[in-house]
Image (cartoon, coloured by chain):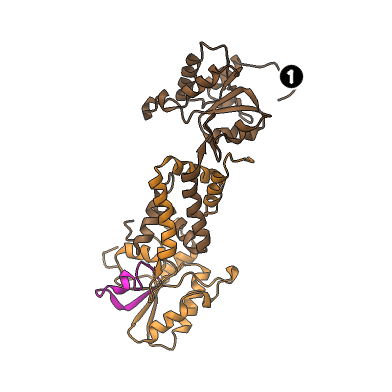
Chain colours: A orange, B brown
Amino acid sequence: MNQQYPSLLLQKAVDEFSKLPGIGKKTAMRLVLHLLRQETSEVDAFGKAIVQLKHEVKYCKVCHNISDTDLCQICANPSRDSSTICVVESIQDVMAVEATQQFHGLYHVLGGVISPMDGIGPSDLQIDSLVDRVSKGDVKEVILALSSTMEGDTTNFYIYRKLADSSVKISVIARGISIGDELEYTDEVTLGRSIVNRTIFTGNI
Amino acid sequence: MNQQYPSLLLQKAVDEFSKLPGIGKKTAMRLVLHLLRQETSEVDAFGKAIVQLKHEVKYCKVCHNISDTDLCQICANPSRDSSTICVVESIQDVMAVEATQQFHGLYHVLGGVISPMDGIGPSDLQIDSLVDRVSKGDVKEVILALSSTMEGDTTNFYIYRKLADSSVKISVIARGISIGDELEYTDEVTLGRSIVNRTIFTGNI
């Protein structure tokens, strides 16, 4: 439907919204009209929250996680185990691992994975700073927690090579069938790996 | 997943986004992180477009459509037929009818339909101003183009009663089977109406 907007201001707002991923013109229109029905103070708060985030947000100088301060809450927390670093792709992945409450070390946010198809090489990622962190000697283990894709595997291997000279232990998160998965529908690579990397049954799941 | 945000600014932006209809915390996070990756000028433009719209938008004093000026483009257009008024619920409906290019009159945007369940009564809608427009005498026909729901029908009837004293012709948009519909799957009320309200076949569809 070729639509003529009744207002240029409306069109501008809809255009801005429809630049967001997964938001088409119709959804954008719905969102903008929803905002128009809100109080002015609420709309101002919406606009301000986004602009302020972009202007004032910081990235932790150690782990590159998003932060309000130079050193993020996790890196600044003395009760975290600073000898273990979990390497992740993104801020969301830090939040995902934190939500498990199973990890008590520090993080290192790469900002993506090596992906020649998308023009992302090692120098676009926070790999050198990871090598720096490890070379300072306090780190005993680096846990690679990247996506189980070709790009993730490539990045894992690149980091492994970069850290080969140091005495740090390098591990990778377990790959196998997910909780709730049915064997019949699990792909053969995953199933094969989960057999090769089987663990001793202790009665716990 | 109970998530702890690494940054208050991030949390505020995600909270604001997730207030929008149909946007949950995960989608909000994805949208906010997308905006964070954009240039500062683009994020500023995004924030400004929304705030500016809310502060500067006007509603046409005649038809109550959204507009940049006191009188909207449609009402201000001398080539439109000012003797026919199409009554619609919302701005989107004006755009939908305009997109058909089948209507050359003016509009009247009610701002909703009568819905006691949602606490919306006639006084919350632009019905009195419609009666005023009609009473000025230039209007020959009022086309009711509301949703084919109980609320839409109630509103149609209410407007019909309000305009009963005037000599204006009141019509309602045709209801029947949609283009592409199969008879077998059409509900009986729609199918019954489309038989009762059959039109002379002229060879055109």
Query: Number of marks in the image?
Result: 1
Position in image of residue B193 (x %, y %): 56, 18
Q: Which residue is mark 1?
A: B202
Q: Is residue B36 above or below residue B131?
A: below
Looking at the rendering, the stretch of residues picked out in magenta corresponds to: A65-86
Magenta segment: does it hold A84? yes
A108, B83: nearer the viewer: B83
Position in image of residue A168 (x %, y %): 37, 84
Position in image of residue B109 (x %, y %): 52, 29
Output the chain of dot 1. Answer: B
Displayed quadrant of residue B4 = bottom left
The residue drawn where x is 57% and y is 14% is B168
Badge 1 density bin: few <14, some 14–19, many ≥20, Cα 10 Å: few
Q: Is residue A114 above or below residue A47?
A: below
The residue drawn where x is 41% and y is 50% is A44
Q: Quadrant of the C terminus of chain B?
A: top right
Q: Amino acid at mark 1?
A: Thr
Magenta segment: does it hold A151? no
The residue drawn where x is 49% and y is 28% is B110
- Of all residues shown, which one is farthest toward the right? B203
A78, A8: nearer the viewer: A8
Direction from residue B23 to residue B105 in the image, left or right: right
A150, B99: nearer the viewer: B99
Direction from residue A58 to residue B183 in the image, left or right: right
Q: Is residue B185 visible?
A: yes
- Of all residues shown, which one is farthest toward the left? A79
Q: Is residue B191 above or below residue A73?
A: above
Under circle 1, the secondary element is loop
B105, A112: nearer the viewer: B105
